[in-house]
Amino acid sequence: MTDRPRLVGINHVALEVGDLDAALEFYGRVFDFELRGRLARMAFVDLGDQFIALAERNRDAPDGERHFGLVVDDLEATRASLEAAGIETLPGRGVNFRDPWGNRVEVVDYRDVQFSKAPSVLRGMGLKPEKRPAALDELRAKGLMDR
């Protein structure tokens, strides 16, 4: 037994952007989302029971390898959306790209990863994705799913 707390998930990710309105427009061209809330220099993009915080700051160079990962219901639709918006994809797992402020984003398909939303959250989001066999095997191997 340990006295240390156990990590159980991600509540939110905070990104620095140069222009908040431009960031919302940029991400709105790629993804369908709703705002959880907005302040003068911050906006909160809803991800069901999680969120991304966009904070307006003025910094120059992006960090080369630091990134955050998003889970979507359709990876191919993400690829098509990025292509339609003229956004270059980068090598890596899933679909990777940089936003105009240098934030690297890695996008994976919900059906292919062990990350799972509770059925009630999926229902509330209007989603019915089915995990693919490899993701199901990964969940079973970790004891996170019935055999």
Image (tube, grey):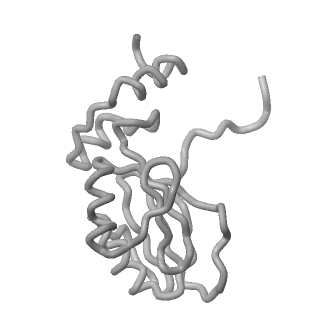
**Quadrant of the image containing the N terminus:** top right
Residue sitting nearer the eye, 49 or 62: 62
Q: Is residue 38 above or below residue 94?
A: below
User: Do we see residue 60 in this rendering?
Assistant: yes
Q: Say which quarter of the image contains residue 133.
A: top left
Q: Residue at x 63, y 75 (%)?
A: 62
Q: Is residue 9 above or below residue 137?
A: below
Q: Residue at x 38, y 72 (%)?
A: 87
Q: Residue at x 39, y 86 (%)?
A: 21
Q: Is residue 9 above or below residue 103?
A: above
> Residue farthest to the top?
147
**Quadrant of the image containing the C terminus:** top left
Numbered disc total: 0
Q: Position of residue 34 (x, y in %)?
A: 29, 67
Q: Is residue 3 left or right of residue 141?
A: right
User: Do we see residue 33 in this rendering?
Assistant: no
Q: Position of residue 145 (x, y in %)?
A: 43, 20
Q: Position of residue 84 (x, y in %)?
A: 26, 71
Q: Residue at x 65, y 61 (%)?
A: 65
